[in-house]
Structure formats: C-alpha cells, structure tokens
Image (cartoon, rainbow, N blue to C red):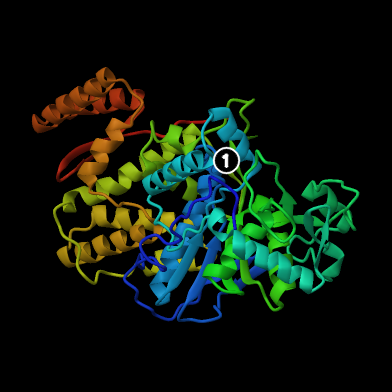
C-alpha cells in the first residue's frame, strides 16, 4: 500500500490500447531495414509477430518544457510508426511519462506546488508541443507512478534469480551476475563504471552495481515495499512498463543516443535477468542535437525549448528541420536551418496551391520512391528530396491525368513524413502569423507583390523584374502560379 499522498492514477492508453493506424493499413509485404545498435549494422526488420508489432520509445521526465533535443526522437519514431503502420495490421506504440525523479521533486519544491500538479501540467504541455509538430500520439502512454507495484515485483524476481541483492534499504542489480552485460554499448568495464556515474557506496558488492530501489525520506515521495518506504530507480521504470503493456520481449526500442548507456544497457540487464530470453530485437537510436554548433546549455544561452520556438515558427517547420538530417547523424539546429525549412515548405505548399480545392481520392497513388527511402533505415533526407522532385514535376505538368497521379503521390509521401497536413491557404496564413517580421514589414511585402502583379498585367516586365529583385533584397522569394503569387522567406546564409 502506498504512503505517497500525491500518488494518482493516469490512463495508460490514449484513446485505446493501440492507436489508430496513421496510414491506410495496406498490409503489403515490405522490406524495412533498420540500423540495430545491438549489432552495429543495418538489418531487415522481422517482428516477433507480424500481426502485432511492438515499439517502445523513452518519453520525457516532466519537470519543465521540453527542448529541441527531446523533440528529435518523437519526430523520428513518429515517421517509423507511420511507416510500420503501412505494412502491419497492428502496431502497438508506447511512449512513457517519467514522473518519479529527483528533478521533479526539486522543481515542485521550488515552485511550491505538489509533485502531481507539476508533472501533469508539463505532461500536458509536452503533448501539446508534440502535436504541434504533427506527431501522432502513442497508443499507450504509461506513467511511472502507476506501475510501482510492477517495479517491486520485477525487483523481487531479480533477487530470486540471483541478479539483485538488498543492502541498507536499497535493492541493487549485481552487474557481474550477468555475463554479457555491456553488449549494447560495447564499453569496457572501466568505461562503464565512469560513464554510469554510479554512486560510490560501501554497501555495494561491485562499483558498477546500480539501484533498483532506494529509501525515501518523509519529505520525498515513496511507497511501501518489502525493503521499506522508498521509490524505484530510473532504469527499472521502463522495464516494468514494457513488461506490463508490450510483453517480455519487444520488437523495437527507441530513444536518443545518450540513453544507450547506462539506461538501455541496464534495461536489458533487468529484462533478461528477470525472465531470460531476448529483451528487445531492434535497438534504434537517434543522434545528438546541437544548437549553432554547440551543445545546448543554459549558460551559453542556446537552450531552445519547443514551446519558445513555436512562438516564432510553425510546428511543421520545426518538424521539417528535424527530418532534414539522417536520424543517426548529429543534427545542428539553428535559426538558419529553420528559415531553410520554412522556405522548403513554402515551395511544397506552393505546388499544392492550384489544387487546393481538389479532394483526396480514397485510394490515392502510392509514393513508392519516398517510401523506399524511408524503408532504408529512415533515410528522411532522401525522402524529402524525392518529395521535392514530385512537387517540381507537378508544377511543370500539363497533362490532367498525370497531374492527378503526381498530386496523390505528393500527398501520400507527405503523409508518411507527417508534412503538408493543412491546406496551402491555411499554411500561408499561419506561416505569416508566426513570421518574426513586424506587421508593417509584411504590409510592405504584400504591397510590393501587388504592384509587381499590376506591372505584369500591364506587360511591364522590366518593372516587374525590378520589384522581384527588391523583394529578394528583403529576403523574400516569390512564386507565380495559377492561383496567384505566393511569397516565402529565403534561407538565411549562415557563415562557416
């Protein structure tokens, strides 16, 4: 029985145990290749059960607004979720909420509010921010506080199997008890001890042993357990939630590269130590995010939260910028990159503008080239390039039947990437609303475009060209189409 006055129950599912498939559920045979961190190579994806694919992605610790680095795995694995849902009848996608953490305790104390209130407020903000990036909600959203009994049971199982022990009110995993510990990160023992930043404590049998359960003071959240009043360690939380909702062995475990060690390494130890067998078949990790070439740091003033960025850029622009680099590579995030993403989306939406009133066909064309790029280890840069090739072909096309084919291919490929999810008219309005330029500058841009249109109508092309160059000098690009002239911000040239 818990003695935590702030304990609460949260719904583990969003809508249902399994989210609605983001695609049409075509269930066609597929060859999807993913880079498996466990074996250091690309492998053909073959799930345990083709009728039920399971994927778990580590979610946020909800004590503040999330930064752009937290958003990258959400967007990356959202694309993978969309791709898998095209090929398998059921994809159970779980992404957790960590609401047991010392940082949450400290933030709640500093704010003078209950831990539960703070956690639920920032969890809601996280969902809002990720939705703004066109990320589909996971089918299952387990909260750590709802799974403490399962964590206690898991710790007991590890004790019984000789992989854990009790010392001074703590339960610790005994690392030497698992012969292949370290197989995910491939680190030497000395590197693992240093990298894990484990607490040096006299009650540990081995310096590398890590905490499964620890005592709580009366001022800290805690639960009754066979080892006294306390709370779980961080690593055991995900393992218990995976066992509860997805099973003892899952197909895909995703997260940032920073989680490979010690978090994911310790998850394997707990899962395979408690139940034997394979804990996870494919480990997929995205690369780090830097800002203007530097690691994010509040002291450097480059700590960018998604919420702050959304005040200046549409969410789709942020998503595009996060997809512009291959997920396994480091990504340097900058305002210049966002301006380039905005310009790219302006071109894509501009291609759709003449067809804004044309409804989607129930069974449109498949974007096979774009999908093939994603099926090859989520090659989003290649997929984006092929999306632009399709858009360029559509702009030049005059054959009505071919136009229809290209239009549906463009829409289908964009759906896979989570892009072009609004009408071109909506995009133009919202893009202008989030543009940092003062309204007086936007009025000047619109006036120049109107004057240029008048010059073109009067066949004064010299004047029209001069006005185009004046707009370019203002950092504005324009595109003429059947529905009129659209404008966008030109990419900012960033010095080397």
What residue do we see at 34% from left, 57% from top?
414
Quarter in which the C terminus is drawn: top right
* Image location of residue 388, percent across then percent down: 36, 53
Label 1 residue SS: strand
Q: Residue furthest top?
A: 440
| Residue in the picture at 38% in, 33% down | 490
| Numbered-mark total | 1
Compared to residue 483, the image places residue 16 above or below, namely below
Compared across the picture, whether 158 is left or right of 93 comes to right
Number of other residues with Cα within 10 Å of mark 1, as a class: few under 14, some 14 to 19, many 20 or more? some
The x and y percentages for residue 324 are 48, 49
In the image, taking residue 36 as reference, residue 425 lies left or right, namely left
* Residue toward you, 290 or 126: 126
**Figure check: 46 above or below 113:** below
Q: Quadrant of residue 103?
A: top right
Label 1: which residue? 332
User: Residue 382, can we see it?
Assistant: no
| Of the pair 227 and 85, the residue shown nearer to us | 227
Residue located farthest toward the left when viewing the structure as drawn: 458
* Residue at (43% x, 55% y) in the render: 385
Can you give x and y, in whole percent of width and height, for residue 474 in the image? 34, 23
**Residue 69 visible (yes or no):** yes
- The x and y percentages for residue 218 are 67, 41
Instruction: Name the residue rendered at 63%, 31% in the picture.
Output: 297
Where is the N terminus found, in terms of image quarters?
A: bottom right
Q: Quadrant of residue 208?
A: bottom right
> Quick check: 335 above or below 252?
above
């Amino acid at each position: 029985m818990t003695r935590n006055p702030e304990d609460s129950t949260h719904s583990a599912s969003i809508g249902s145990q399994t989210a609605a498939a983001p695609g049409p559920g075509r269930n066609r045979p597929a060859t999807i290749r993913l880079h498996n961190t466990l074996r250091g190579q690309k492998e053909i994806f073959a799930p345990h059960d083709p009728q039920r694919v399971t994927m778990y992605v580590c979610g946020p610790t909800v004590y503040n607004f999330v930064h752009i680095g937290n958003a990258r795995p959400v967007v990356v694995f959202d694309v993978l979720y969309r791709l898998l849902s095209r090929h398998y009848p059921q994809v159970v996608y779980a992404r957790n909420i960590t609401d047991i953490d010392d940082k949450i305790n400290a933030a709640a104390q500093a704010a003078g509010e209950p831990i539960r209130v703070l956690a639920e407020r920032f969890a809601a903000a996280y969902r809002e921010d990720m939705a703004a990036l066109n990320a589909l909600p996971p089918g299952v959203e387990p909260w750590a506080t709802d799974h403490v009994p399962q964590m206690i049971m898991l710790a007991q199982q590890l004790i019984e199997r000789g992989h854990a022990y009790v010392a001074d009110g703590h339960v610790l995993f005994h690392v030497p008890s698992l012969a292949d510990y370290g197989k995910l990160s491939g680190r030497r023992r000395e590197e693992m001890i240093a990298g894990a930043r484990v607490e040096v404590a006299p009650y540990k049998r081995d310096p590398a042993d890590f905490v499964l359960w620890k005592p709580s003071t009366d001022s800290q959240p805690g639960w009754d357990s066979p080892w006294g009043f306390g709370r779980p360690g961080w690593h055991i939380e995900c393992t218990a939630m995976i066992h509860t909702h997805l099973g003892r062995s899952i197909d895909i475990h995703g997260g940032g590269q920073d989680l490979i060690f010690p978090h994911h390494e310790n998850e394997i130890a707990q899962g395979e130590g408690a139940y034997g067998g394979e804990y996870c078949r494919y480990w997929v990790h995205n690369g780090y995010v830097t800002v203007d070439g530097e690691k994010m740091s509040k002291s450097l003033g480059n700590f960018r939260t998604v919420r702050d960025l959304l005040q200046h850029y549409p969410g789709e622009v942020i998503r595009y910028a996060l997809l512009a680099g291959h997920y396994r590579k480091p990504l340097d995030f900058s305002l210049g990159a966002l301006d380039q993403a905005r310009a790219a989306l302006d071109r894509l939406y501009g291609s759709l503008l003449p067809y804004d009133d044309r409804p989607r066909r129930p069974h449109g064309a498949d974007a096979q080239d774009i999908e093939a790029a994603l099926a090859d280890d989520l090659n989003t840069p290649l997929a984006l390039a092929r999306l632009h090739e399709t858009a360029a072909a559509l702009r030049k096309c005059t054959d009505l039947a071919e136009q229809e084919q290209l239009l549906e291919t463009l829409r289908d490929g964009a759906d896979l990437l989570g892009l072009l999810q609004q009408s071109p008219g909506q995009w133009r309005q919202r893009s202008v609303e989030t543009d940092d330029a003062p309204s007086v500058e936007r009025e000047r841009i619109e006036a120049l475009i109107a004057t240029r249109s008048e010059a073109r109508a009067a066949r004064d092309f010299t004047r029209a060209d001069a006005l185009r160059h004046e707009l370019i000098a203002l950092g504005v690009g324009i595109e003429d189409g059947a529905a009129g002239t659209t404008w966008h911000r030109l990419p900012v040239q960033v010095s080397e």
